[in-house]
Image (cartoon, rainbow, N blue to C red):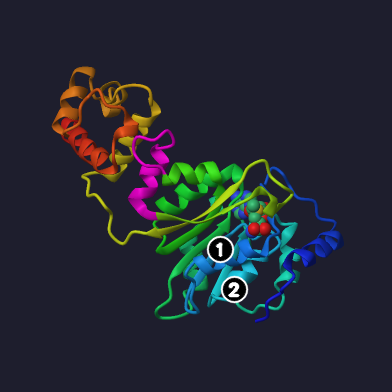
Amino acid sequence: MKRNNSRSAREAGIKRKYGFHNSKSLGQNFLTDDSVIDDIAAASKIGPEDLVIEIGPGMGVLTAAVADYAGRVVAIEVDKRLIPVLHETLADYDNIEIVNADIMKTDLNEIIEKYGIPGPEGKVRIVGNLPYYITTPILMMLLESRIPAETITIMMQKEVAERIMADPGSRTYGALTVAVSYYCVPSIVREVSKECFSPVPKVDSTVLRLDMRHEKPVTVKSESLLFETVKAGFGKRRKTMANAITGLRGLEKGMAASVLEKAGIDPKRRAETLSLEDFAALADAVYEAVTE
Ligand code: SAM
């Protein structure tokens, strides 16, 4: 394996050779800052026995950096114009598989089965500089797909990262914060200026590492009802919780307040003040009320 040290300079030459123009609709803002690439790779906790799945390799700058740490890398890129480019930029690596597919239509458990975890102590790790237009759907798909991932290290628009890291009571706290905290422990790897991309996007970015939880922080009677309750709460953000959960699984208005009280929650509170534990207690109270 060999590392290309002037990645971004090489990128410009290859783009000219292939007559490649970035697609705005596919969120193709490519990384040009080597320190960001190195920091993502280093923060991903990748070891030689690990299988890394990269989402959206673009021209392969991050792919090469993670391949230096990993046993095997599977890079999934939707744009077929980039496949010959990737075969050229990553030609020196014998531990990278390039797959032309849409990540949202890819069965990641099948990918893991097909390519395998290289070592007995190896883990599955996800990395990616995510396309802005589809960050939250990709993240929710990763969390809900039950893939045995140990870490997910991803770059996203700064504002999305702020929502993930928000504390209860804050303006940015919402359904995404609660859902992510159910599945994993998020931490900030670094902030990234928009100047570190080509073309330069309108927004700054943040790299987060999500350490997947081996045990869930709350136990509930129905996981799907927990997420329905969270969605109902934040769907009517300005309303009191009593109003927000009226209609949830057919819950009548008169019952909403008593269900909340049973869960130890003041019916006048709003969703942004509820912790994951509060939502779990509420979901169980709703469960009891609607199945009785
Ligand atoms: N990793 C490269 C880098 O950091 O320079 C490229 C990152 S760019 C922000 C996002 C990449 O994801 C692009 O290469 C784009 O074509 C690809 N992409 C967009 N939508 C995708 C999807 N649904 N499935 C797989 N890749 C996708």
* Residue at 44% from the left image edge and 62% from the top image edge: 151
Is residue 158 highlighted in magenta? Answer: no
Residue assigned mark 1: 40
Left or right relative to 227: residue 49: right
**Secondary structure state at the residue bearing disc 1:** helix
Q: Is residue 223 visible?
A: yes
Is 269 above or below relative to 142? above
Looking at the rendered structure, the kind of residue marked 1 is: Ile
Residue assigned mark 2: 67
* Residue at 16% from the left image edge and 35% from the top image edge: 288
Query: Do the residues under discs 2 and 1 have CB atoms within 8 angstroms?
Result: no
Q: Is residue 292 visible?
A: no
Could you give the CA–CA distance between mark 2 and mark 1, rounded to whole angstroms?
A: 12 Å
Q: x, y percentage for residue 153?
A: 50, 59
Of labels 2 and 1, the one closer to you? 1
Q: Nearer the viewer, residue 87 or 168?
A: 168
Q: Is mark 1 within 8 Å of ligand 1?
A: no
Looking at the rendered structure, the kind of residue marked 2 is: Ala
Q: Give the quadrant of ligand 1.
A: bottom right
In terms of image quadrants, where is residue 291?
top left
Q: x, y percentage for residue 255?
A: 18, 22
Q: x, y percentage for residue 237?
A: 38, 26
